Amino acid sequence: MSQINNIPPIQMPKHDPDKYKNVPKEYLQVAEGMESQFTNHLLNEMRKSVKAPSGPAEGIYRSMLDAERSKLMAQTNTGLGIKDVVLREIYPNFDKPNLGNVKMYKDINAQNVHSTQGENNE
């Protein structure tokens, strides 16, 4: 019994409402679509494991309800996490912090200096 009490509590991810504010709309739509498809498939497979009396109309209703639930889950910031995985792959700047215009200006100037030095040495 002491082993059960020594288990650390589960750490839930923190809710960040501005998590997707710098992500272009097109990338966000693609990622949400993929999470929605995965969630819909997951719900369909879970529903197959439960025997419930249903007719053809109820089956259509449940599939439409699952599709809407999947879309809503994909649009939240705390969904299954598929959206974040997809965004990390298709939009590399997703997890990087916004460093501001001053830092970007310094980086551009540093690149320009290095590029002209290479031309003079040739």
Image: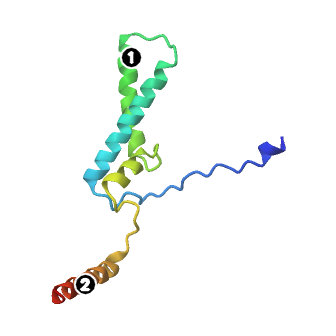
Q: Is residue 63 above or below residue 27?
A: above
Seen at 44% across and 11% down, the residue is 54
Seen at 31% across and 53% down, the residue is 90
Which residue is label 1 attached to?
59
Residue nearer the viewer, 39 or 118: 118
Question: Element under label 2?
Answer: helix
Seen at 71% across and 51% down, the residue is 8
Q: Kindly indicate the quadrant of the structure image that contains residue 101.
A: bottom left
Query: Type of residue at label 2?
Result: His
* Label 1 CA crowd tier, 10 Å (few <14, some 14–19, many 20+): few
* Label 2 CA crowd tier, 10 Å (few <14, some 14–19, many 20+): few
Q: Is residue 20 above or below residue 101?
A: above
Q: Kindly indicate the quadrant of the structure image that contains residue 120.
A: bottom left
Q: Quadrant of the N terminus?
A: top right
Residue 71: in sight, yes or no? Answer: no
Query: Type of residue at label 1?
Result: Gly
Earlier in the chain: of badge 1 and badge 2, it is 1
Q: How many numbered dots are placed on residues in this image?
A: 2
Which residue is label 2 attached to?
114
Q: Quadrant of the C terminus?
A: bottom left
Q: Kindly indicate the quadrant of the structure image that contains residue 108.
A: bottom left
Seen at 35% across and 60% down, the residue is 21
Judged left or right of residue 24, residue 20 is right
Judged left or right of residue 10, residue 22 is left
Residue 23, percent across and down? Answer: 32, 58
Residue 73, percent across and down? Answer: 42, 40
Judged left or right of residue 86, residue 108 is left
Residue 110, percent across and down? Answer: 28, 84
Question: Element under label 1?
Answer: helix
3D distance between C-alphas at marks 1 and 2? 64 Å
Residue placed farthest to the front in the image?
122
Residue 67, percent across and down? Answer: 36, 30
